[in-house]
Image: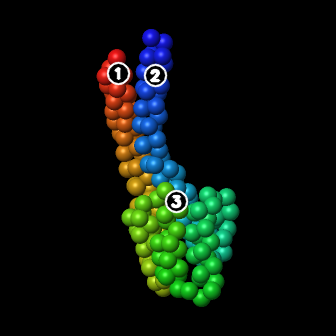
Amino acid sequence: MAIKITGAVLIIITSCIIGYLLTIKEDLRCKDLTEIEKILQNIFSQIDYKKEVLTVAIDNSIENSNIYIKNIFEQISTAIKNNTSVSTAWRVSFENNYQFTDISKEDATKISALGEVLTSGDIDFQEKGFKGAITYIHNTIQTSKEKSLKDKKIYRCLCSSLGLLIVILLF
């Protein structure tokens, strides 16, 4: 009897852990998007207020970042220093490296579109591009957090119920 109870407890605990693991992806996506948002805000403020060059602003903004996100921005900076156009460097870096982070392909595509805006000569248009990218990321983070909370509740209930069903069927 003790073995059956121990097995039942293990099944329920395992099913709850599986439910938790299914929801962790959205939390990691939020974390990476928050970091990218912070970097873009820092780059924008350095360009706007300190009048830094884009490559210097990028290099200054990524010092304490996640290694994979840091790699994306380092590649952008290096490519620009090697005379690659800003739009190409931005697009290629995000397309080639987003899979090493927890951001989605859609997120990478939308953020990489900022590179097209940065090539325009109009400073106001570039400012709107930065603000638009930061707003997109902020809204995506909020949506992702809401989805994560909802999914956590669903998976927790679903996996607990499934664990209980298995226990009932075993007895």
Tell me which amino acid carries mark 3.
Thr
Q: Quadrant of the N terminus?
A: top left
Q: Which residue is mark 3?
A: 101
Colouring scheme applied when the structure was drawn: rainbow
> Disc 1 versus disc 2: distance between alpha carbons?
10 Å
> Disc 1 versus disc 3: distance between alpha carbons?
41 Å
Residue situated in front as seen by the camera: 86 or 99: 99
Spot the residue most to the top: 1
- Asked which secondary structure carries label 1, the reply is helix
Residue situated in front as seen by the camera: 23 or 168: 168
Q: Which residue is mark 1?
A: 170
Would you say the residues marked 1 and 2 are in contact, meaning their CB atoms lie under 8 Å apart? yes
Residue at point 49%, 82% (across, down): 88
Q: Position of residue 102 (x, y in %)?
A: 49, 56
Residue at point 41%, 69% (across, down): 109
Tell me which amino acid carries mark 1.
Leu
Is 69 on the left-hand or right-hand side of 103?
right
Residue at point 47%, 44% (across, down): 24
- Asked which secondary structure carries label 2, the reply is helix
Q: Is residue 103 above or below residue 115?
A: above
Q: Residue 104, which numbered label? A: none
Mark 1 neighbour density, 10 Å: few (under 14) some (14–19) many (20 or more): few
Question: Which is more foreground, mark 2 or mark 3?
Answer: 2
* Sequence-earlier tag: 1 or 3: 3
Tell me which amino acid carries mark 2.
Gly
Would you say the residues marked 2 and 3 are in contact, meaning their CB atoms lie under 8 Å apart? no
Residue situated in front as seen by the camera: 26 or 90: 26
Residue at point 31%, 22% (across, down): 169
Q: Position of residue 136 (x, y in %)?
A: 41, 61
Spot the residue most to the bottom: 83
Q: Which residue is mark 2?
A: 7
